[in-house]
Image (cartoon, helix red, strand yellow):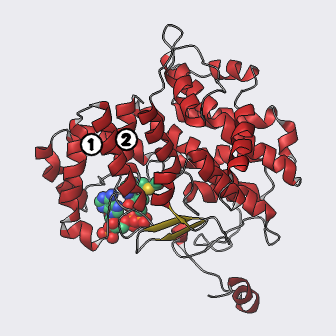
Amino acid sequence: VIDIRKLYAETGAFTYDPGFTSTASCESALTYIDGDAGILLHRGYPIDQLAEKSSFMEVAYLLINGELPTGDELDKFSNTITRHTMLHEQLATFYRGFRRDAHPMAIMCGVVGALSAFYHDSTDIADPLQRMIAIHRLIAKMPTIAAMAYKYSVGQPFVYPNNDLSYTANFLRMTFSVPAEEYVVDPIIVDAMDKIFILHADHEQNASTSTVRLAGSSGANPFACIAAGIACLWGPAHGGANEAALNMLREIGTVEKIPEYIARAKNKDDPFRLMGFGHRVYKNFDPRAKVMQKTAADVLNKLGVTDPIFDVARELEQIALKDDYFIEKKLYPNVDFYSGVILSAIGFPTSMFTVLFALARTVGWVAQWNEMISDPAQKIGRPRQLYVGPTQRDYLPVGDR
Ligand code: ACO
């Protein structure tokens, strides 16, 4: 390991690494990824075991506190989260300021950023207790914020949290209940949704998490930092890929049309990429995609839904996995490839997909943010650059140019 600080102090040299492909920006004990082997561990626990056996609340506790909770600890944590699910009533007015057709991610960026105007006490980041309250508030309020963004976009009244329900069941109810018809919480859907949340909870220093850390490194308040993470997540190369992947599968539509799209993805002159394929770190199967594929099959099966999109997805995967281009470039399905199929079967419009990702990733963002603030070696993030502009020159008055 090169000690860059020492190298810089002695020689003035620094690394040029666009996209940070091989530069560690921090030390972290949260998440381990071996991209070549397709391994993802949270605090040492394999993601497939967590998705299979754990719950989103338990994984949230694990990421934040470092250990799996005891039964009492889990109850206390879940109760604390439940106590914070309400939003300040004035925030409902804030929603109404957005255009009806606003993308729910746009609403989410705005509303989460505005939380600091409502919860002033949580902006004292030097106090570990206040930091923990901010963490609880963010995790607890995210489902309410996401469900309200959805309700606003479809022109239905907001549904208040029901704190008798679990985190995930509560979110589904707030999203899908209407005054005329209370949403009947289906345990199959709750279980699938909980798995999707677990699979998206954290993924070390991805673009949005790095954004949260960079914003937080200046001492910005936690709500502003998470709003920055949401903004970064929105891009189609990152969290927006699940929306793009489903749109792509719908566009392909039938198994017969797959070769045409594979050919386009391989054509250097065509900017088209197979959405939900490829990953900066995984050069093997994304372990989350494996769980997601199985969950998609289970959900469609149990709900009795036959969706041709799922057949297109499976066939596309099979063709790509045998294709030299994808083999050579080590392009495998990522977590976003199958998530859209499940979310669509549950009833979410594509515009909500990235919102759900943000809801789940909030857990990772706040855990990473807290780890950073607690780290005595923490400094303001300040990347350097290679200057490629003009050398020094003299200013000319406008008439002389
Ligand atoms: N389809 C076709 N070709 C691809 C794809 C793809 N999905 N992904 C990468 N490639 C090709 C590139 O054209 C490039 O080819 P070249 O070497 O001939 O120029 C090569 O593979 C390497 O690609 P890069 O873009 O340099 O790899 P990088 O690590 O920067 O990008 C990324 C990773 C952004 C995920 C990319 O694979 C991609 O755009 N995938 C589609 C979008 C997507 O699914 N994003 C979700 C990521 S996971 C997440 O955020 C949860």
Q: Is mark 2 on a helix, strand or loop?
A: helix
Residue at 67 percent across and 70 percent down: it is 26
Residue with the mark numbered 1: 249
Please, is residue 25 above or below residue 93 in the view?
Answer: below
Residue 315 is situated, as x and y percent measured from the top left of the image, at 19, 51
Q: Quadrant of residue 297?
A: top left
The residues bearing labels 1 and 2 have C-alpha atoms spaced at a distance of 9 Å
Q: In which quarter of the image is residue 206?
A: bottom right
Residue at 63 percent across and 64 percent down: it is 30
Quadrant (top left, top right, bottom left, bottom right) of the C terminus? bottom right
Please, is residue 82 above or below residue 207 in the view?
Answer: above
Residue 340 marker: 2
* Residue kind at label 2, given as amino acid type: Gly
Quadrant (top left, top right, bottom left, bottom right) of the N terminus? bottom right
Residue at 31 percent across and 54 percent down: it is 273
Q: Nearer the viewer, mark 1 or mark 2?
A: 2
**CB of mark 1 within 8 Å of CB of mark 2?**
yes
- 263 sits left or right of 208 in the view: left
